Image: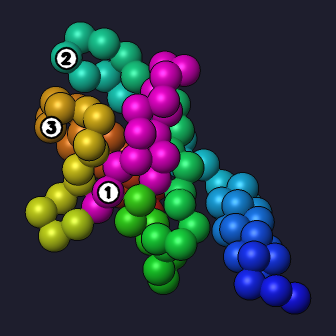
Amino acid sequence: MDNSTRAYVTLLKQFIGQLEKEPIPIEFDYDGRSYKGEGVPIAETCLKGFCYELDISLNNEPLGIIHYGRSGWKMDLVKDQKLVDAIGAQILRHYE
């Protein structure tokens, strides 16, 4: 198998791993609005049953990737940090 084929197989395995992860349901109210959707764990960021990055969709809109780090939850495409924290709280509840 040549390098390009190996790279393709690796990419497919990652994609399959992503599809095999169960989405985390997310539902909450924030700032007078109801939110409902899911966070799809990004398989390569999961360690010991906790996923540090998830692809978030709420109210049928993709919001991007949420990242968990030392300083809490962050999202590049969502500027309202309180909304990001509310999403993160739902994810943490799932893992409790």
The three-letter amino acid code for the residue at tag 3 is Gln
**Which of the pair 40/75 is nearer the observer?**
75
Q: Nearer the viewer, mark 1 or mark 2?
A: 1
Q: Report x, y in % for residue 80.
A: 16, 30
At 76% across and 70% down in the image, what residue appears? Answer: 8
Q: Which mark is residue 67?
A: 1
The three-letter amino acid code for the residue at tag 1 is His
- The answer to if 58 sits in the magenta stretch is yes
Question: Within 10 angstroms of label 1, few (less than 14), some, or many (20 or more) residues?
Answer: some
Provide the major secondary structure of the magenta segment.
strand
Residue placed under numbered mark 3 in the picture: 81
The three-letter amino acid code for the residue at tag 2 is Asp
Q: Which region shows up in magenta?
A: 54-68
Cα–Cα gap, marks 1 and 2? 22 Å
**Is 19 displayed left or right of 33 in the figure?**
right
Mark 1 or 2, nearer chain start: 2
Residue placed under numbered mark 2 in the picture: 31
Describe the element under mark 2 as helix, strand or loop: loop
At 21% across and 43% down in the image, what residue appears? Answer: 85
Question: Within 10 angstroms of label 2, few (less than 14), some, or many (20 or more) residues?
Answer: few
- Note whether 63 is above or below 59 in the view shown: below
Find out whether the residues at labels 1 and 2 contact each other: C-beta distance under 8 Å.
no
At 75% across and 76% down in the image, what residue appears? Answer: 4
Q: Report x, y in % for residue 42.
A: 53, 60
Find out whether the residues at labels 3 and 1 contact each other: C-beta distance under 8 Å.
no
Cα–Cα gap, marks 3 and 1? 12 Å
Q: How is the image coloured?
A: rainbow
